[in-house]
Image (spheres, grey):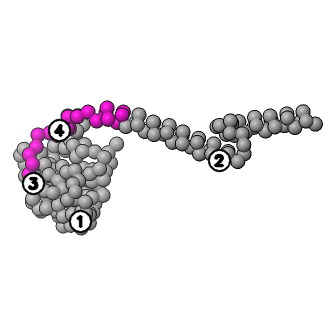
């Protein structure tokens, strides 16, 4: 009988070793402390992993050259939220105004590189007067801006381009262009919405 009790205690302790990270804490009363010690060590491991991650991020934060517009252009208007870039060399008639995405890309995504440019494609296919919004980064001053601030500045751009345009919105710029067309329908000749793939 004594032998059975001893074997049973050994068996209970070996079960506890599988359940708890610190089997040396054999007294059931102290098992919660074992649990918290395990949490502390896991927390330290997470902290170590985060520090490794931050070191890798820091390595990646090397000063990179800013992207540039692929097609020659001039700044036609400089507003708080954007610069209006004009790619036109000659031509008459309505401007085609490209509204690029505002988040996740720079505005240059619509004129990324030779043979990878919406601006270039438009001009090669007979659209002579092309402009694009060049969104500026948000500033502290812009923290309370809402959609009306951006629509107002798009409206100012359209007025600068003669008061009526063919409007192309890409990705996030697509819903902004759609809202602009809904707000100022007489200023939009055509509306084209595209998605960046």
At label 2, counting other C-alpha atoms closer than 10 Å, the crowd grade (few under 14, some 14-19, many 20 or more) is few
Q: Which of marks 3 and 1 is nearer the N terminus?
A: 3
Magenta highlight range: 55-77
Residue that badge 4 annotates: 68
Q: Which of marks 2 and 1 is nearer the N terminus?
A: 2
Residue that badge 2 annotates: 32
Rounded to the nearest angstrom, the CA distance separating label 3 from label 4 is 18 Å
Residue that badge 3 annotates: 77
Which element carries disc 4, helix, strand or loop? loop
Contact, mark 3 vs mark 1 (Cβ under 8 Å): no
User: Residue placed at 24% from the left, 62% from the top?
Assistant: 145
Residue 71 to residue 194: above or below? above
Asked whether the viewer can see residue 70, the reply is yes
User: Residue placed at 68% from the left, 36% from the top?
Assistant: 23
Which element carries disc 2, helix, strand or loop? helix
Residue that badge 1 annotates: 148
């Amino acid at each position: 009988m004594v032998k059975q009790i001893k074997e049973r205690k050994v068996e209970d302790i070996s079960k506890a070793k599988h359940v708890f990270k610190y089997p040396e804490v054999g007294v059931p009363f102290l098992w919660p402390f074992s649990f918290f010690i395990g949490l502390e060590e896991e927390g330290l491991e997470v902290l170590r992993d985060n520090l490794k991650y931050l070191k890798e991020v820091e390595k990646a934060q090397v000063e990179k050259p800013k992207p540039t517009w692929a097609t020659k252009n001039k700044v036609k208007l400089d507003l708080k939220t954007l610069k209006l870039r004009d790619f036109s060399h000659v031509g008459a008639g309505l401007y085609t105004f490209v509204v690029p995405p505002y988040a996740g890309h720079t505005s240059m995504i619509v004129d990324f590189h030779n043979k990878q440019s919406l601006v270039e494609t438009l001009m090669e296919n007979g659209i002579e007067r092309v402009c694009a919004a060049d969104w500026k980064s948000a500033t502290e001053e812009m923290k309370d801006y809402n959609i009306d601030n951006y629509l107002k500045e798009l409206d100012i751009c359209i007025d600068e381009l003669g008061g009526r345009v063919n409007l192309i919105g890409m990705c996030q710029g697509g819903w902004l262009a759609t809202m602009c067309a809904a707000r100022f329908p007489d200023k939009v000749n055509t509306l084209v919405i595209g998605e960046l793939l």
